[in-house]
Image (cartoon, rainbow, N blue to C red):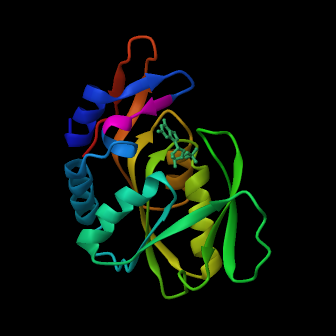
Amino acid sequence: MNFLEERIVKEGIVKAGNVLKVDSFLNHQIDIDVYRQMGEEFKKRFEGKPINKILTIEASGIGIACAVATPFHVPLVSAKKSTRINIDGDVYTAEVESFTHKTKNQIIVSKKFLTPDDHILIIDDFLANGCALQGLISLVNQAGGTVEGIGIAIEKGFQIGGQIIRNMGYQLESLAIVEGMNDETGEVFFRENK
Ligand code: 5GP
């Protein structure tokens, strides 16, 4: 098991509805050492790619994306969520359905911060059905930029998102892939990882 899988086994809480809570170290209270290790691991896995920007989605992606932007020495752009339809011409927008809240949000990024010259690494905390990632990919495509890769902390491999994104041809790197979890025993099972 790698550092993240070990921490999930120790502190992750399996909730009904296929939700894994990792509030004690990943997205409520944050263990900076875990974030730093994740940043370094993504740097290794995307070595050699001409990445000049990190893209994530607020709120829980931002911290991890900061830890990734640090070893890459590149700026980080965070797509904003908005319940209002944005009709200004100065932003790119996509619709994303929230897995945890079951609501639909517009996500937006200013046209100033995504351009055809950008080579983007997309980062998020969880991958479930892939809706958030497809929204982020759409924003990069609208700008004419290039998605160089996608880094996820925890992929729930029993949900469809990972397969959809890999079938689209992207290099998707997940630091922990959960193959199954049991909300009665609290057990979490992982896919064999690098
Ligand atoms: P997707 O769009 O892939 O269905 O869901 C990804 C988004 O939903 C992530 O940005 C994450 O914030 C949230 N999410 C999905 N599954 C989980 C989960 O099991 N636990 C937590 N804490 N967040 C999740």
Give whichever of 29, 52 is nearer the camera: 29
Q: Quadrant of residue 137?
A: bottom right
Instruction: Give residue 2's position: percent from left, percent from top.
Output: 20, 40
Which quadrant is the N terminus positioned in? Answer: top left
Q: Which residue is most to the top? A: 184
Span highlighted in magenta in the image = 19-24
Give whichever of 88, 71 is nearer the camera: 88
Can residue 47 be seen from the camera position used here?
no
Q: Is residue 89 left or right of residue 175?
A: right
Q: Residue at x 60, y 58 (%)?
A: 134
Q: Quadrant of residue 63?
A: bottom left
Q: Residue at x 59, y 64 (%)?
A: 80
Give whichever of 41, 56 is nearer the camera: 56
Q: Residue at x 76, y 79 (%)?
A: 88
Can residue 150 be seen from the camera position used here?
yes
On whether residue 96 falls in the magenta region, the answer is: no
Q: Which residue is most to the front? A: 29
Q: Is residue 56 left or right of residue 136?
A: left
Q: Is residue 48 above or below residue 150?
A: below
* Numbered label tally: 0
Q: Is residue 108 above or below residue 183?
A: below
Q: Residue at x 76, y 61 (%)?
A: 84
Q: Is residue 126 above or below residue 65?
A: above
Instruction: Give residue 78's position: percent from left, percent from top.
Output: 50, 67
Instruction: Give residue 32's position: percent from left, percent from top.
Output: 24, 52
Instruction: Give residue 9's position: percent from left, percent from top.
Output: 28, 27
Q: Is residue 150 left or right of residue 113?
A: left
On whether residue 21 falls in the magenta region, the answer is: yes
